[in-house]
Image (tube, rainbow, N blue to C red):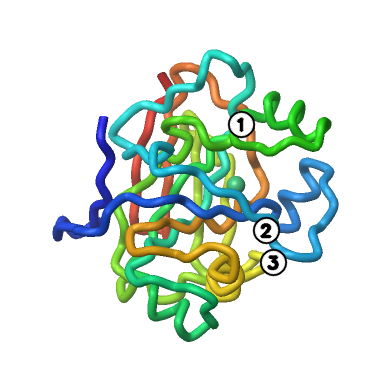
Amino acid sequence: MTYQHSFEDGTPCQLPAGKVVCVGRNYVDHIKELDNPVPTEPILFIKPATSLQPFSEPVIVPAYSHNCHHETELAVLVGEKLFCGDRESADKAIAGFGIALDLTLRDIQQGLKEKGLPWEKAKAFDGSCPISPFVKKEQLANPQDTMLKLLVNGAVQQEESTKLMITGILDLMAYMSAFFSLMPGDVILTGTPAGVSQLNSGDRLDLELDGRFRYTVSVA
Ligand code: ZN
């Protein structure tokens, strides 16, 4: 399986699939549900390009985990290089928006956290970032106040506005770009609101962005 970025409207996307730069603990209600401390600055981690897969492919939970959580997040497609950027240059660098799952092997992550070890085995495995086609930037009137919604087997599990992010999209991108060059084709994940829960084989996930863009993915 080779993943390629695509646009919701069917126009071709030439941007190569790059890395996925993510933030942990960016919504207060999610921090509380996992009993984590509120961070004083964004907690960053990266998923490799091999984590990306389209919603048309089923989610596959690695055999070494027995507790894979969904985290529903607003995704940003980077269209221009951003290094040590500010809010203005971050805004210019955005090519589009999508909705993604930051799949997290909670049992593995817990073990790593307790030992103070990096999270990659829990967060960066192949297929750990199922993602939608991208909506072009101008199609989303207010990305900082748009609804993210996830239904699991028909029941609402996550539903929140992106206005509740602790660090907003542009500040987050500027912060990230101080540490890592954001390159054309990279993706930013902006954190999950509350409602994360365990996925089970056979689950049907329905995702909705901005009340308009709907996608379905299954769990193998
Ligand atoms: Zn996340």
Give the camera-side residue of 56 and 207. 56
Left or right of 208? Residue 11 is left
- Neighbor class of circle 3 (other Cα within 10 Å; few <14, some 14-19, many 20+) is some
Question: In the image, what residue occupies the spot 52% across and 79% down?
Answer: 85
Asked whether the beta carbons under mark 1 and mark 3 sit within 8 Å of each other, the answer is no
Give the camera-side residue of 103 and 155. 103
Left or right of 161? Residue 131 is left
Q: Does 77 appear above or below 111?
A: below
Question: In the image, what residue occupies the spot 49% across and 39% down?
Answer: 151
| Dot placed on the residue nearer the N-terminal end, 1 or 2 | 2
Q: Nearest to the eye among marks 1 and 2: give it.
A: 1
Q: Does 49 appear above or below 73?
A: above
Q: CA distance from mark 1 to mark 3?
A: 23 Å
| Dot placed on the residue nearer the N-terminal end, 2 or 3 | 2
Per the image, the residue denoted by label 3 is: 166
Occupied quadrant, residue 104: top right
Residue type highlighted by circle 2: Asn
Q: CA distance from mark 2 to mark 3?
A: 5 Å
**Dividing the image into 4 quarters, which one contains the C terminus?**
top left
Residue located farthest toward the left when viewing the structure as drawn:
11
Q: Nearest to the eye among marks 1 and 3: give it.
A: 1
Per the image, the residue denoted by label 2 is: 26
Local SS, label 2: loop
Residue located farthest toward the bottom when viewing the structure as drawn:
88
Image label count: 3
Residue type highlighted by circle 3: Ile
Asked whether the beta carbons under mark 2 and mark 3 sit within 8 Å of each other, the answer is yes
**Dividing the image into 4 quarters, which one contains the N terminus?**
top left
Any atom of ligand 1 within 8 Å of the CB at mark 3?
no
Per the image, the residue denoted by label 1 is: 122
* Image spot of residue 31 (x, y percent): 76, 50
